[in-house]
Image (tube, rainbow, N blue to C red):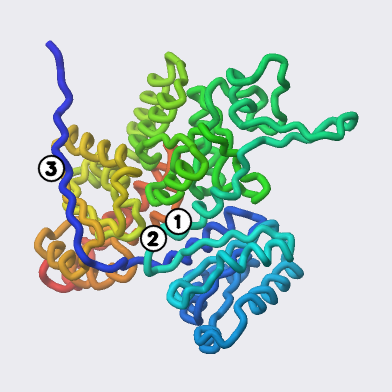
Amino acid sequence: MTSTLPVPNPLNFDCETGNYHTFCPISCVAWLYQKIEDSFFLVIGTKTCGYFLQNAMGVMIFAEPRYAMAELEEGDINAKLNDYEELRRLCQQIKRDRNPSVMVWIGTCTTEIIKMDLEGIAPKLEAELGIPIVVARANGLDYAFTQGEDTVLAAMVNRCPTEVVTAAPENKPEKESRSVLETFWPGNQKSGQKRGQKTTAEAPASHPPLVIFGSLPDPVVTQLTLELEKVGITVSGWLPAKHYQDLPVIAPGTFVVGANPFLSRTASTLVRKKQARLINAPFPIGPDGTHAWITAIARALGVMNPDWEQTLAQRQAEVWQHPQVQAYLELLRGKTVFFMGDNLLEISLARFLTRCGMIPLEIGIPYMDKRYQESELALLAQTCAEMGVEAPTIVEKPDNFRQLQRIQQLQPDLVITGMAHANPLEARGITTKWSVELTFAQIHGFGNTQALLELITRPLRRNAALKPLGWEKLVAPGR
């Protein structure tokens, strides 16, 4: 008797004409300046941009942030002032006060509208100041909240070296350089050639080089690196690196894989400009996604370890069987969830919550790149089939007015939405969860499953605790 897996129902796709109802993408400065420790971010925009940054990152007043605003006044917008001279003055001051190893210029909506030639100014100032200047367009006209990071990383791809340069011995004045494939993959080394000094492990990897792109907190980077090492995979580098000088070597043929679903521009830049080989995989969010992510990497790299599949399956089972995780799953099982669309994590979160026993009614997403999220979409369809759940509709650029009408009709148990809609929905008796919390929280990898479930279930547990106090009578009718 043979058993067959359920055939996945095809996902339904729709596209409405709504605007991006998300944070401005210049907010990527909040986590990128902390990730790249020796950087300085200069946001070029109007006072409105400055007010936004003040409010979005006001909690850091006791820290010493490495970002600033270059505010455009009416005179600048009318082209009566010299952009080069003003930016030169600001950058000289930044160099004098902070002396960063790299400056990142973030272009806002205003720089797009007035056609400010940042890409033309930056090389001249870079040569004059002796500091690399990376130009990234992160304006809210073209990009949603988390895509600001995507534009910054795509701009940094061009600065990644293609060869490893090792310091020559004292008796040899010349420098020795070799391609990254020869350095990290000994199978490509010529006979008698010495191994490069810049490696991420004591021994060279037995597979082609692997670079992971996506800005993740250092503890998560360590966790994912160790999880890959358990199945015999060595990570050659991360983009971005903690220090600009440590940008990963990306030679033609280097394998690259994304850690977040909003980095499609970075992925295409790596493939087109660096001739890298993209591993199309689901994303390491939840134990199911992490398992699939590592499996896709191992198969793409040709890692022939007979025990790694069993190791991953056992690791995933241990996470699901944890008593606290089981308690969270009991709370979620059978409940419905609706995504309004905010941070482009919606597909991965819907797949994970479906595996947890929830029923996704609709998945709104600001921007959908079906090629980059191909594996994630396939895993979502497969998960829905295995859990006996009808495949949800994925709505790109959702119209908020229509979404609110659908929410009122469907009455979901939980709505994951941006901050702007949370309070109005709560006033109508709809339980909500801020999607921005999931953006900043550590939700990747096996080890963060419990933290992810704690965030998701918090509003449900709050309501359960308030129910004996008659909380439901205080909200507006219509639930």
Along the line of sight, which residue is nearer the eye, 184 or 158? Answer: 158
Q: Which tag, 1 or 3, sits closer to the chain's start? A: 3
Q: Is residue 356 above or below residue 87?
A: above
Check disc 1 and report its element: helix, strand or loop.
helix
Q: Amino acid at mark 2?
A: Val
> Which residue is label 2 attached to?
436
Horizontal side of residue 82 vs 6, given as left or right: right
Image point (35%, 66%), residue name: 22
Residue 299 figure quarter: top left
> Which residue is label 1 attached to?
440
Check disc 2 and report its element: helix, strand or loop.
helix
How many numbered marks does the figure carry?
3
Q: Is residue 305 above or below residue 390?
A: above
Image point (62%, 25%), residue name: 182
> Which residue is label 3 attached to?
390
Give how far across and how far down residue 355 sits, in percent: 25, 38
Check disc 3 and report its element: helix, strand or loop.
loop
Asked whether the viewer can see residue 327, the reply is no
Horizontal side of residue 374 vs 45, given as left or right: left
